[in-house]
Amino acid sequence: MTQPVVARSDTVHHTLVPHEVVLLLETDLHHGLSEREAELRLQRFGPNVLPQAKSAGLLVRWLRQFHHPLIYILLAAGAVTGLLGAAVDAVVIFAVVLVNAVVGVIQESKAEAALEGLRAVIRTEARVLRGGQARRLPSQDLVPGDLVLVEAGDRVPADLRLVRLAELRADESALTGESTPVAKDEIALPRDTPVADRRNMLYSGTMATSGTGAGIVVATGAETELGEIHRLVGTTEALATPLTRKLTRFSKILTVGILTLAAVTFAVGAARGEPAVEMFTAAVALAVGAIPEGLPAAVTITLAIGVTRMPGAGRWYGACRRWRRWAARRWSAPTRPGP
């Protein structure tokens, strides 16, 4: 048997008519795959799951929170302050640094939880025709060429090319952002049709809202459109926002300024004949006092609070928009003439 072509980069299945998809994937439109063929394809393509995102260990994420110029200064200041005998001040500085690190680790953990949420989206059960018999299987057992039966309320377990349907609509908001259910059909479409307009396809992670249908699995796991989103999210590099760029620039300027001021203080005192040890202590005290040790924690905590309040602000914003629309209709409505 020839190897079926399923990679999204090799074949655009929405451009093919149903019988061409059947021939390409070497399946059967009425009986589906045999159990033996399904086992062979499962060995070849692997389970229908999204790959586990590579994440740094807890220790690496913890240490990464200290990679900032201002944190370097705070650590050095805390160490020197402790050596000079100011134990309380040293403890306060180190406590601020640790609180900042804890908040940073928690925020990174929430981002990783979002990736895990994408993996959980496709974990479901599917009704599949195998050897002419309809049966329910875990979604991870699906393979390219399987004939999946879909009805209202089902979550789509893989990317499917629809081959027959009846009044089928799907909620694709998780993939395309379209807020209303999309009507489906099995007609072949042009090659350059955007994903959101491919009416003859059902995509992994979306939901059937009405009607029934049957589709052939054309992509599983990381090869699905949802898998592509998962890959992009997992490989996204951390971008420096305007705020972080300004903070980094401020930290560098502050570091240079504090070190320069401390050096000038030591040099002037030494030039006037003051004891070197006393002048060094005074310079260190000046540097420690000038460092805004609460700035990193204050910025991190403020941003975290802002993130938690954003959903509520969005609801208020939506309510205000609805009220303005209602008011515009109410006040601009023509008044009825008097008797």
Image: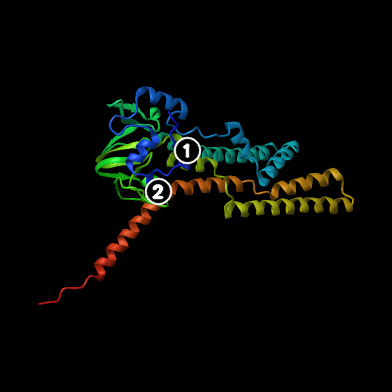
Q: Is residue 202 left or right of residue 247?
A: left
Residue 268 visible in the displayed image: yes
Circle 1: is it few (<14), some (14-19), or many (20+) Cα within 10 Å? some
Image position, residue 279 (x, y; %):
82, 47
Three-letter code for the amino acid on which mark 1 is drawn: Leu
Distance of mark 2 from mark 1, alpha carbons?
22 Å
Q: Quadrant of the C terminus?
A: bottom left
The one of 227 and 101 positioned closer to us in this rendering: 227
Report which quarter residue 22 is drawn in.
top left
The one of 321 and 118 positioned closer to us in this rendering: 118
User: Circle 1 is placed at which residue position?
Assistant: 115
State the mark number for residue 143. none
The correct choice, above or below, for 189 with respect to 83 in the image is below
The one of 50 and 333 positioned closer to us in this rendering: 50
**Which residue sits furthest left?**
339
Q: Quadrant of the N terminus?
A: top left
Residue at image position (42%, 35%) is 220
| Dot placed on the residue nearer the N-terminal end, 2 or 1 | 1
Residue 121 visible in the displayed image: no
Report which quarter residue 210 is drawn in.
top left
User: Circle 2 is placed at which residue position?
Assistant: 195
Q: Could you say whether the residue bearing mark 1 is in a helix, strand or loop?
A: helix
